[in-house]
Image (cartoon, grey):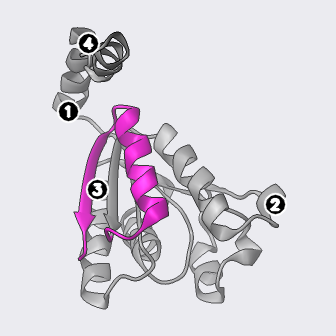
Amino acid sequence: MGPSESSAAAATIPTVDELAQELLMIQQSGPKKVAVFGTRNLPLTHQQLVEMLSYALVLSGNQIFTSGGANGTNVAVIRGAQRANPDRLSIILPQTIGQQPGEVQDLLIGIKNIVEYPERRTMTLADASKICNHEIIDQCNQVICFLYHTSHTLLESVNYAKERRKIVTSFYLD
């Protein structure tokens, strides 16, 4: 290995302190901040499973973070968390409530913890979603993502979470 290869490999190996911190986070039995997001192209049976997962996570005392979007993962997360305890749900939108589909806007009525970004109104949804996912990940200890191997924005978000040493669980649907 040349000097640049050696330093690149060393930069990716976690230190003992980093590993100890990760182990401590995994062992914590108390509530966590959990990001749950994923594809809009989620079959109904999978939506029901995601909704139950979200419901159970909230009932366990966790704070759930997700984004908006058309029917799919994020809507299922919102429904489950809202049914368990809407105060334990935080939604960070990629853009604004007005840019959400009508059924999602209706679902968001009464939820206290919503952040929207009017300044991203003119961005593409993909670009705004990438920023949004990073913001969600930065606020959480754990990330759960439902995606396909072709979901570029979500794959990038999962890699972003891993780089930040988050506990990441990816459910690939293909």
Which residue is tagged 3? 57
Which residue is tagged 1? 26
Q: Position of residue 46 (x, y in %)?
A: 26, 80
Q: Nearer the viewer, mark 4 or mark 3?
A: 4
Q: Crowdedness of circle 1 by 10 Å Cα count: few (<14), some, many (20+)?
A: some
In depth, the one of 7 and 133 nearer the eye is 7
- Say which mark, if any, is on residue 118: 2
Contact between marks 2 and 1 (CB within 8 A): the answer is no
Q: CA distance from mark 2 to mark 1?
A: 36 Å
Q: CA distance from mark 4 to mark 3?
A: 31 Å
- Identify the residue shown where x is 62% and y is 83%: 106
One can see residue 130 in this view: yes
Q: Which mark is first along the chain, 1 or 3?
A: 1
Q: CA distance from mark 4 to mark 2?
A: 40 Å
- Identify the residue shown where x is 21% and y is 10%: 16
Q: Position of residue 150 (x, y in %)?
A: 37, 71
Q: Which residues are magenta?
A: 148-174
Q: CA distance from mark 3 to mark 1?
A: 15 Å
- Say which mark, if any, is on residue 15: 4
- Identify the residue shown where x is 29% and y is 72%: 50
